[in-house]
Structures are given as structure tokens and as C-alpha cells.
Image (cartoon, grey):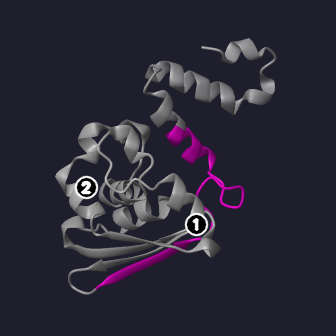
Amino acid sequence: MNLLEEIGTQKNLDIESIEKIDLEIGPVASTAASIKEPQKGVEGKFSVWFLAALALAEGSVTLAKFTDEKVNDPRLVRLRRKIETHLDPRIGFGARFCIRMKDGTEHKGFLAKPKGDPDNPLSFGELTKKFRSAAGLVKSNKEVEALIASIQKLETVYDMNDLAY
């Protein structure tokens, strides 16, 4: 959903002005993320509708956002109900979308390979941002930053136990 995060942020979309979203997905997303109306936070991880709505509305999808409150947020529920998905087996792990605004404007995009794929790798900055988001749920900021600093100089670490915090 990285492309939807970018579109929502760059275009500064007013999600209430969205009329409809057509989302073409491949077979993996179609089966692995098939919960159309998640009720629990953990179900949001398996809902292409919630993931797309969250990416567009908030500009980021992080572990901390998979809460019962977030999947039941009325504005996200309204937005995900505007999303129609279509299976296209040729897409594989990618996605194609068309966001139609109430004024007739359309925003289209296609992502052949999702961010993190070997053909579309994350930069070190993107990896650290993702790591901070996930590790910050269980580790202190100081511990997270120390581990990132250690990883940046990994080739100089002689004892891997030094990385075990």
C-alpha cells in the first residue's frame, strides 16, 4: 500500500471527497487480505480494504495502527466501503488503483512490485523507520536507537551477543 500512502500524502486528498476507489489486486492479496469488514485490530492486517483506507487517510500503515478503535473508526469505515476490489492474476504481488473524486478528478497508479520486494527494495532510511515503528512497541527508544547504530556498523561487530539487548 506504499503507493497509496504516497498518493494520499502528496495529493493531500480529502478522503471525504472520494467517490470511489477501484483496486486491482493479485491472487495473494485477494486471499491473504480478504476480510472485507474487520471488527478487531488484528483483522485489519488481513483486510485489503482497511489497509488501503488507512494508507490513504493517514499516510502510513504501522503496527501500532492495528487496533479495534482504528478498524472501527467511522471515517475509515466509510472510506473502505468506497473501495471495490478486482482480481487480476497477472498483477502478482502488485496493485493498480483508480481513485475517483466527487469532482470527477481521477488519481491512478500501478505498483508492479511492492516496496520491500528485491526488485523494489527499501532504503536503509525506510528500513529504520519501519524498525522503529515495530520495535518501539516493545523496546525503549534508547534501546532501538542503540540497535540501529550497531547494525550500521555490523561489519565491525565481533561478538553477536553485543547485539542482544
Say which mark, if any, is on residue 94: 1
Query: Is residue 17 left or right of 34 when viewed as pictured?
Result: left
At horizontal 51% and vertical 41% (from top left) the residue drawn is 130
Give the crowd class for mark 1: few <14, some 14-19, many >=20 residues within 10 Å: many
Query: In the picture, residue 104 is in which quadrant?
Result: bottom left
Residue at the extreme bottom of the image, as rendered? 104
Instruction: Depth check: give the residue in front, 135 or 19.
Output: 19
N-terminal of the pair, mark 2 or mark 1, is 2
At horizontal 81% and vertical 17% (from top left) the residue drawn is 158
Q: Given the image, on which type of amino acid does mark 2 rest? A: Leu
Q: CA distance from mark 2 to mark 1?
A: 23 Å
Instruction: Depth check: give the residue in front, 48 or 119.
Output: 48
Q: Given the image, on which type of amino acid does mark 1 rest? A: Gly
Instruction: Depth check: give the residue in front, 121 or 96.
Output: 96
- Report if the CB atoms under discs 2 and 1 are less than 8 Å apart: no
* Residue range (magenta): 105-130
Residue 138 appears at what percent x and percent y? Answer: 45, 22
Which element type, helix, strand or loop, lies under badge 1?
Answer: loop
Query: In the picture, residue 51 is in which quadrant?
Result: bottom left
Query: Is residue 73 left or right of 144 when viewed as pictured?
Result: left
Residue 103 appears at what percent x and percent y? Answer: 21, 85
Residue 55 appears at what percent x and percent y? Answer: 38, 57
At horizontal 30% and vertical 61% (from top left) the residue drawn is 80
49 w.r.t. 89: above or below:
above
Residue bearing the label numbered 2: 76
Q: Is residue 96 rendered magenta in the image?
A: no
In the rendered image, which quarter contains the C terminus? top right
Residue 144 appears at what percent x and percent y? Answer: 52, 25
Q: Is residue 116 rendered magenta in the image?
A: yes
Which element type, helix, strand or loop, lies under badge 2?
Answer: helix
Say which mark, if any, is on residue 61: none
